[in-house]
Image (tube, helix red, strand yellow):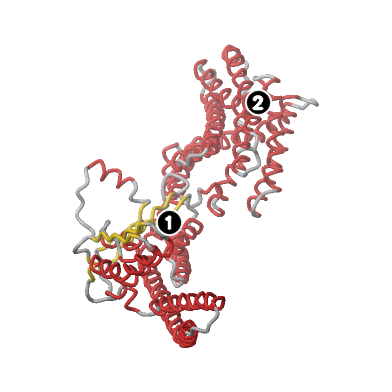
Amino acid sequence: MGSLVYIRLIGCTFGTLLQLFWMVVILGYRRQRNFERVFFFLCLALFFFYGGSLLALNSQIYYRQPPVALNQFAIVIISSGLCMLPALLLHLHMEYAETRGLLKNKRWKLAVLFLFYAACLHLVIRRMPLLMQDPQFNFLVPGSSLGEGFAITLAVALAWCGGWERRFATSAPDKPQRYFHWALLAFFVASFLAVDGLHLRPFPMQARTTEALATAFSMLPILPFSVLIYLVFRHNFLQIGRQKNLLYAISATFLALLYLSLVRRVGTWLEPLLPPEASASILLFVLVIFIEPLQHALGRRLQETAHREMDRVQRLTAEIQQEARQGNLRGLVRFIEGRVKEVFELAAVNLTLVDQSKAELQPSSRTPEERAASAALSDRVFILRKGHQLMAALQAEPHGAGLSGETQAALEFLCEQLPGALDLCRLIEEKLQLERELAERERLALVGQMAASISHNLKNPLGSMKTILQVQLENPELPDSMRAETKMVLEEVGRLSAKLNQLLQFSRPTLLGDASEACDVGEAVKEVSEVMRPEAERKGIELAVSAQCGLKVKASREAVSDIASNLVVNGLEAATAGGHLRVSASLMGGKALPNMFVNLIKII
């Protein structure tokens, strides 16, 4: 066998395992996006190509004349993968462009994808029966057996994907993504040239050159998929980087499979010198040498990961403590949700506070179905406790199927620190509320003192003016024209005095409902009505009283009398001669005093 055959064997083996690796990662990740779904089917198509090529190579090595059924099976899976490859490549780029906000017209996208999928389906339906009957299927360059239609479709798709990669590179948010997209652009340019050289044949090539170019072209997709693994680990591409436990497990599994495949290949190569069992035993025993270095490397890696996560949690806790000192509990909850989502790269975070009066933890009385549903979310919901009390619940939604081990441990450690921050925020918020209430009371007291001072300072001059005016009115020598004007001024002075009395009463604490004994509202209304009845008769207004007996409120007698007298005075001023004024008091809903009198004492 030539060296190119060995290269193709190793490359197809590695390509098959690599695509299988990505399919398992996507299935384990289970993110609900079309991009991941299309990426899975693209990996499946390449898996069919590499798996079928590996099957055909092995059949050619181990059989002098490969069985027809085996060749037909290899042709089917290779052709199926290649036929769907152009449409899946273009579909993947369009889905990624849509997630980046670079593709707005969905109808145009659906139309283009319909044309490409229709072309690929046409190739499968029309070419597959012909290939099954063709004994000269070219396993080295299988695209040539699919015809020029496939070559043109693949070339157009590769050119279009190259254009998308250029747009992705120019709009990339950081350097790793920018470099990756430029590298993919170079990959698509090289693939486009290889397709032209192998399938469209713009210039003749020797058989050895064709074989080398076909081998290189078939191995070319391995590079971006391998680089993508590195970028996922180092830069969290596709938000899979947080699922390191999944990546580590799958990587270890496929490295073991790859090594076993290598053992088998080396055993075949060394068969003229050693029996295959002996070479396999030696190669497997060699792994013992690497156990201790591997253990040290893994231990150091896990320790670094633990330190990094704890440092991240401590920095985040310090930020949360600083925010808690603002004394805004709702703002703190929003801050925690936003920062936890950003720091741990989650899809969504929801922090739900629990009523402290109902937060005592009790033995579970849920049904088995409820307990099973709760267990399914146990790795996403973290309980914040303070002693035996439930304070809050933090729900973390990852981009994929579940949280990684280090992220879950970091969130559990963070949730042990959050109750202290929430308590601190509550205490500061209560302190600020008390300070605001105290400042408001001090302001009201100051307003009351100022009102009392103004009232006392103005009542004496008004009293003197009133006395002088009354004396003038009693003077018989006062002209009638001056008497009417003096009487009007005297009424206005009386009105000002009444307003000052109201302002003075407002400044007294007893008027604000701070009485120690209850007052009978009905008696107060009747008493005020009897006092105001002469004034009503003088104005020709009929005054009627309807007060419910035994109606008591927690207020001073003076306050209730003032409220009733103000209402009656306003009613008398509003009513005209010959009118009717009815004053009633009744209980409605047991409301507080200020609202009660507004609603309960009616003037009709």
View extreme (right): residue: 203
Q: Which quadrant holds residue 336?
A: bottom left
**Cα–Cα gap, marks 1 and 2:** 46 Å
Query: Is disc 2 placed on a helix, strand or loop?
Result: loop
Q: Which of 293 and 540 is in front in this view?
A: 540
Q: Which quadrant holds residue 579?
A: bottom left
Position of residue 510 in the picture relative to residue 183 (left or right): left
Sequence order check: which comes first, mark 1 or mark 2? 2
Position of residue 15 in the picture relative to residue 292 (left or right): right
Q: Measuring 42% from the left and 51% from the top, which residue is drawn there?
A: 403
Location of the C terminus by quadrant is: bottom left
Q: Which of 329 and 156 is in front in this view?
A: 329
Q: Measuring 41% from the left and 47% from the top, which residue is drawn there?
A: 402
Position of residue 574 in the picture relative to residue 200 (left or right): left
Q: Position of residue 429 (x, y in %)?
A: 40, 71
Q: Mark 1 points at which residue?
A: 407
